[in-house]
Structures are given as C-alpha cells and as structure tokens.
Amino acid sequence: MQVNGRYSRFLSCKPLPTEGCHCKNCGTTFTGFYCPRCGQSAKTRRLSLLNTIEDTVGLLTNLDSGILRTCTELFWRPGHMMRDYIQGHRKGYMKPLSLLFCVGTIYYFLIYLFAQEALTSGFDIDEELMSDQETEKLVPILTVLGELAKQWLNNPALVHLSLILPMVPATWLCFRKTTLGKALNLMELFHIQVLMACQMLIVTFFSSIYSWITGGHLSYNDMQQLPIFLLFIWDYKQLYNIGWWRSFRLTLLCSIVTFVFALLMLAALASLVVLFIYLKN
C-alpha cells in the first residue's frame, strides 16, 4: 500500500491522549502531545545518561524531524512522496533544500574520508592544442576552463547538482500535458528536482565508492546511469500517475531535453568566463 502511494506510515497520526497534562514550562493545562501555548512536549523526563544518548542519536539521525524518514520514502514511494509534499503534506518530511544540504555534506564527508585521493584524478589539456599558434593567446583562458572542467567532471555529485536547473524547464516541457503537470509551477518543479537530486547523490555515493574500489578514481563516466534512469522512470510514473511506457518515453525525452539545455547553459557560462578573462587581460 505504501509503494502504491495509498499509505505513508510516517504521516500517520497517533491518537490523542484523553488525560490532561500540565505544562512544566508555562503552566498551561492541555490535552495532547505538545503545549499549544509554548510548544513544549508533554513528556519531559529527568536528564539522564539514557536521555543524553537518545538526544545525540536523534540529532544525528532525525535532523529537522526526518532526514532518514524522507530518504526512506525517496526510495520507497518517491513519486507519491514528492506529490504529497507539493500538495501540502510536509509535517513528516524534511525541507528539500535542507535535505540536499545535509545529504551533500554527508556525501562529501564520506568521500573525503574513504576516497580523498580519488578526487584528485583528472585530465590534462591537450598539449597539441596548447602549442598551436592560433590558440597560443588563449592559453590562460583554456587553462582556467580546463581546470573548471576537471573539477566538474571528476565529481559526479557536482555533475548531478548542476543538472537541477536545466531539468526544471525540461520536466515542465515534457510533462506539461499530464494532469499534474498542468498544475505545477516552476518553483514546485524546482523542489521536485531537488528531491530527485538527493536521490542521485545517494546512488552516486555508493556507485562512486564502488568505482573507486575497482578503478581507483571517481568520474562521471564511471557512474552506472541505468539505475538512475530507471529510478527516474519510477519517480515520474508515481508523481504524474501515468503508465510505465509513457513514463519511459517522457523520461527519455526529458533526459535529451535536459542535455540540450545543459549544453546551452554551459556554453553561455563559458562565454561569460572567456569574456571576463579577455576584458581583464
């Protein structure tokens, strides 16, 4: 039922207690789990070693009321979870941008912890191109662009994060004829793409560690793109409530359109960098 989107145990509410409670913070008498005046929990136990351990574990595993719960639903009922969040069911979920920040921080921490030297691998600019007389004046520009490209391509996380913006108009363009697609605006699509980027970061981490163990370096080419593509098909199928075949066709089209938009944005960014360096020199 949860996979089909009919139920989410994280959003279910516990029955309210019938006994009254006296708030130890403001003195208000109320019925429920939290004081309606100051918001303090009705259960306030004495400080002990067990409470300290529980608070520490809760801080690491339940940041902002649900990092693990949100990540669980991202891989259990992803499309339904995204639609629930867009439609206002947000109490049991972590905010997308906060989740992206936390997942990204954990990603980089673990990557640097286990595979720090792997991030230093890369490629060099073609020596023949650098020795060409026609491009000799562009050596500083090509050096800067080559270094930026190396840092970008050598980090799968940056590749996926940079695809968030081009995926927003691509998703709107490809899914605009669906029932939900007609109602979503660009900011709602942006938050959906942020949640999907969190999925990609999690998958990227495990794939990158595997690539590092087997190949000794991390790169975008080492990523297994098929699992992510299949995950996107599942996401869009549940989100837009469409069939598998239609989801496959629209996801494939969305990937192509995203690639085109990404190239246009990259070309515009490279042009701005070249113009800036040219004017500076």
Image (cartoon, helix red, strand yellow):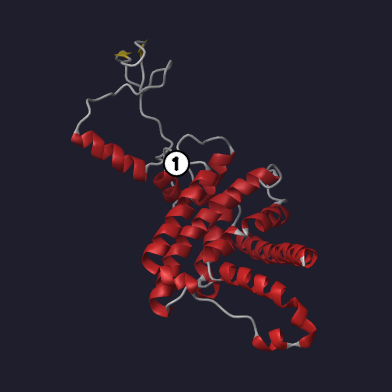
Residue extending furthest front?
281
Q: Is residue 233 visible?
A: no
Q: Which residue is mark 1?
A: 7
Q: Quadrant of the C terminus?
A: bottom right
Residue lying farthest to the left in this orientation: 49
Q: Mark 1 falls on what kind of element?
A: loop
At x 64%, y 43%, the residue is 188
* Residue sitting nearer the eye, 248 or 143: 143
**Which residue appears at 69% of the width and 46% of the height?**
186
Q: Position of residue 207 (x, y in %)?
A: 44, 68
Q: Position of residue 213 (x, y in %)?
A: 38, 75
| Image position, residue 252 (x, y; %) | 64, 65
Indicate the amino acid at tag 1. Answer: Tyr
- Give left or right: position of 55 versus 192: left
* Numbered circles on residues, count: 1
Q: Position of residue 132 (x, y in %)?
A: 75, 87
Question: Visible in this render: residue 146?
Answer: yes
Q: Who is closer to the viewer here, 229 or 115?
A: 115
Q: Toward the viewer: 257 or 270?
A: 270
In the image, residue 47 sits, relative to residue 72, either above or below, namely above
Q: Quadrant of residue 37?
A: top left
Q: Please state if 213 lies on the left or on the right of 43 as rendered.
A: right
Question: Which residue is depicted at the point 71% across and 72% down?
Answer: 141
Left or right: where 246 falls relative to 265: left
Q: How many neighbours does mark 1 have within 10 angstroms: few (below 14), some (14-19), or many (20 or more)?
A: few
Q: Is residue 177 above or below residue 268?
A: above
